Amino acid sequence: MDEPTQRNPVRAGVIVTGTEVLTATIRDENGPWISQQLTSLGIELAEILVVADHRNDLRNALEHMRSVGIDLIITTGGLGPTADDLTAEVVAEFTGRELRLDREMEAKIEQILSRFAASTTVNLTAEAINAANRKQALIPRGATALDPVGTAPGLVVPGPDGIVVLVLPGPPRELRPMWATALGLPPVKEVLGRATPLHFYRLRMFGTPESELAMELREIEADGNSLDELEVTTCLRKGEVEIDVRYRDGAEGAADALRAELQSRFAKTLYSVDGTTVDQVVAGLLQGHRLGLAESCSAGLLAARIADVPGASDYFAGGAVTYSDESKTGLLGVDPDLIERHGAVSDEVAEAMAIGALEQFAADVAVSITGIAGPGGGTGEKPVGLVCFHARNIAGETKSLSPVIPGGRRDVRERSALVGMHLLRRLLGQG
Amino acid sequence: MDEPTQRNPVRAGVIVTGTEVLTATIRDENGPWISQQLTSLGIELAEILVVADHRNDLRNALEHMRSVGIDLIITTGGLGPTADDLTAEVVAEFTGRELRLDREMEAKIEQILSRFAASTTVNLTAEAINAANRKQALIPRGATALDPVGTAPGLVVPGPDGIVVLVLPGPPRELRPMWATALGLPPVKEVLGRATPLHFYRLRMFGTPESELAMELREIEADGNSLDELEVTTCLRKGEVEIDVRYRDGAEGAADALRAELQSRFAKTLYSVDGTTVDQVVAGLLQGHRLGLAESCSAGLLAARIADVPGASDYFAGGAVTYSDESKTGLLGVDPDLIERHGAVSDEVAEAMAIGALEQFAADVAVSITGIAGPGGGTGEKPVGLVCFHARNIAGETKSLSPVIPGGRRDVRERSALVGMHLLRRLLGQG
């Protein structure tokens, strides 16, 4: 395999402008996200180029993308109101288009900034607002402006050699909605239309190691299921295994067969066949229930995940973060003698915490978590990473376990919330 | 501020070869790590370019780095035994150096592979070992090989125009020790020697918009403080503004003067002058105290941040996640009539929750958060994003506010935890 036998018909490149990314102050979240979006559209992301907020660097980056035959250049960042936000200006130069003030856009931005000024106690002077406003409303002639999600508009700019430059803001929560809008615009649609669509599904597993999955995939193939037409990627991600399957028209049969094989071989651990997350699965299962939580080492991380789903107030009564022994007794009625006899991190205390949460929150389902997150507090018998879980419903059904979770303090705490979520899923009848 | 007035004397570029990074299957850990190493050596990382494992893409990447004036090119990845591991070969071409088999290196790799074969259940045939071995022992003439940490040697290759190419393996645990070795080798030392060390400090602010900071920076300059010798980067990060200042020997005076100006102009909002985070500041202030929390919309996010700091159990008693009205009454003793009269999201209920948390956790400091995270639940009078905060100590001192936080559900919840943290900071005497 020297060179790939065929290049995809459409190649995309991402230019990330951001000194903060280069200095490792922040991580680029946009490159990976755009990559996934492009993949689902059947487009190869050929390059990601991170450059500083300097005019020359950005201009060189655009020229480089052109020289290597990129069809769709996506820039992220550099659209703010300050002087080192240069993207619109440099892209205008690169595409040979003059910048002009878009009055309509100016009015939109003014409205956004006024709203913002009204909602904050900080005084924004009219002068500051106007300067920022005028700069951000400069649009290259012939480009299409994308309405701001924050305060900066995005741009779709037709460039030389049939290249399209899509100019997007840096903050992911502004970039993502704007991406969706951009896909519908004629110049972008035209480029995308040259690619053949790629179909995709994602499976999620919890409790199967990646190595076992790899072995099973080889067996599936040995049993006569060809995977040649499928692109299968497995990825260990935050304690779960994700299996991504991509395929083009005509390979539906092979794709469906693989999914069915995996479902039957991993009936216990494969919990999602459509990309749904465990948080979404649990949210669905909790409808009509009333949930109470009792957390020690995870200290609110499970509660925060539960409440992250819109509408959680329909079933989430509340949680007790009982970090001290006194609070386990005070809030959850855990017998101090039980803590004395078995220790705060024990199956017995985990059970008492879950029972306490059922009562305290008048809940019909409860989960408790108590463990040693470290770095201190471990003993020979109870090492750092030992976490006791107990899930219980009002009918007295229970699921419990007490694994030793590897990793540092944050790993132990985050994994605890994940395990608690899966225990809840199993108690609620899935798996 | 069009272009920085002076370029750094040494510019470095990182080329990441890895289809897995482009497809967002894995995250690049090397770019940020190398960036930090370079910064401490006073060298500017000018670009990070991620390309696929294709010969042409890698060759174009090297040419691009040369064309933009990079002095030190660092490649990561593509040094394995398989056919798509092309880095050594392409770098040899780029630097005009012939590949030759290094017998000594071949022997070293053979020894490593034999050890590896003995320690695994996988059968490596002698043939496979030899092929891999020979390929990885090919060294460009005149280059210095770096002993393998895994199985692949690294390379220091003098290139055209005084460029030095440092070829490193992809896995971070192989790359990092090899980096240390490379720094001591003459061609790398020579490049690094041209740089003067770069000093750095970071300030953190909360409550000042970036636009106001930009204006104030212009004023500071207009008032006669030259910023020409300083590289000042401002970055909006998770609701706070970070100001990074980098400077070389001789610019200490300007750097100190800027810090003093910012401290006096933003006395209320600039809370960290040494890069300390608010979580660390609050952890320090909480020593000797006993903290109780009462969270509704943030649902454990503040508790989780407090508990994220090792040793938090010294001062963190616990928190009540009172998502339902009943739990506000049951856990925190909030009068149901008060909720009825003012609503669960009100200054009155926030105050009652904080008082309840002080009592319930026998705490001497407490913070409460109750708000409307959305997307539902907003009204004309109380829109989505309205969050009421109340911080109170046992002496009856209080800090409270009730802003409307912009953004989606997750933004509102995360920002709530941040505001709660800052309110706690202020109550504990800082600011």
Image (cartoon, coloured by chain):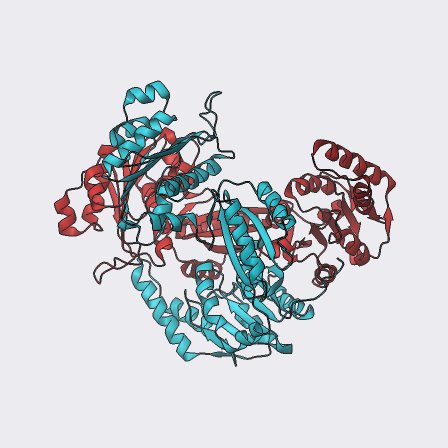
Chain colours: A cyan, B red
Q: Residue furthest front?
A: A224
Q: Could you say which is closer to the camera, residue A107 or residue A290?
A: A290
Q: What is the x, y in percent for residue B48?
A: 63, 56
B430 displayed left or right of B114: left
Q: What is the x, y in percent for residue A382?
A: 45, 23
Q: What is the x, y in percent for residue B14?
A: 66, 53
Q: Could you say which is closer to the camera, residue B224 or residue A32?
A: A32
The residue under the point 35% across, 65% down is A125
**Residue B290 in view (yes/no):** no
Q: How many marks?
A: 0
Residue A300 image-quadrant placement: top left
Q: Could you say which is closer to the camera, residue B170 or residue A238?
A: A238
Q: Quadrant of the N terminus of chain A?
A: bottom right
Q: Residue furthest bottom?
A: A142
Q: Quadrant of the C terminus of chain A?
A: top left
The residue under the point 68% across, 43% down is B175
Q: What is the x, y in percent for residue B146?
A: 77, 41
**Residue A187 in view (yes/no):** yes
The residue under the point 49% across, 20% down is A380
B8 displayed left or right of B327: right
Image position of B174 with respect to B378: above or below:
above
The residue under the point 37% across, 47% down is A282
Residue B409 image-quadrant placement: bottom left
